[in-house]
Amino acid sequence: AQSVTQPDIHITVSEGASLELRCNYSYGATPYLFWYVQSPGQGLQLLLKYFSGDTLVQGIKGFEAEFKRSQSSFNLRKPSVHWSDAAEYFCASNSNSGYALNFGKGTSLLVTP
Amino acid sequence: GAGVSQTPSNKVTEKGKYVELRCDPISGHTALYWYRQSLGQGPEFLIYFQGTGAADDSGLPNDRFFAVRPEGSVSTLKIQRTERGDSAVYLCASSSLPTNEQFFGPGTRLTVL
């Protein structure tokens, strides 16, 4: 079955430090891959997406993600975290013939001063 | 422009009651999706509309759940004989194919007492 795994339930980083959130997928073909952020009381906001082509994808708010087929991963990175980045982050995927997004369980990011 | 809107933002009901949750997608978006997000989990797909028809309702948990989109715009998710296990945040998203980027509403938090 198709699945998305986010191994880390909680991550704590200091403000200004770098960030990497992990995401692994399980699909037969190359899926479409997404990262969403959810702040308290807010809807899910798309940070970036990968459909094909360049494996390093740039998103909003200074985030980027790299698709690595050999590792079935699509990790999210940011070089310097800001306190406002504290939120829940979801990795999601779907096959290129399907429409329903399949979400991971999320990683909760805490940013300390 | 206006994003996806959902009403009500919160709904508290008693076990056994009937509830309706409304979603107003982004104007011109032909695809509409419903997801359910339980506490500590990622969103789970319920149903997908293309235009007025339900193209994929494989995520609906049982026949107490039903959704309509009679004019291809606003959608209503209907839950009969609510159970405590139905308590969750119900998310609606819309997209303009073929980009497949889904834009999410803020959700309706349903609490069944």
Image: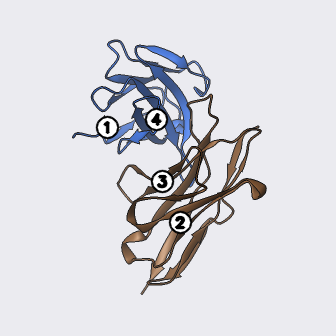
Gap in angstroms between the C-alphas marked 4 and 2: 28 Å
Residue at the disc numbered 4: B99
Residue at the disc numbered 3: A48
Foreground mark, 1 or 2? 1
Say which element carries label 4.
loop
In front here: A85 or B8? A85
Gap in angstroms between the C-alphas marked 1 and 4: 17 Å
Identify which amino acid the numbered label 4 is placed on.
Thr
Q: How is the image coloured?
A: by chain
User: x and y percent of residue A45 in the render?
Assistant: 40, 51
Gap in angstroms between the C-alphas marked 3 and 1: 19 Å
Residue at the disc numbered 2: A108
| Vertical placement of residue A56 versus B6, above or below | below
- Choose the circle earlier in sequence order: 2 or 3: 3
The chain letter under disc 4 is B
User: x and y percent of residue B62 in the render?
Assistant: 60, 23
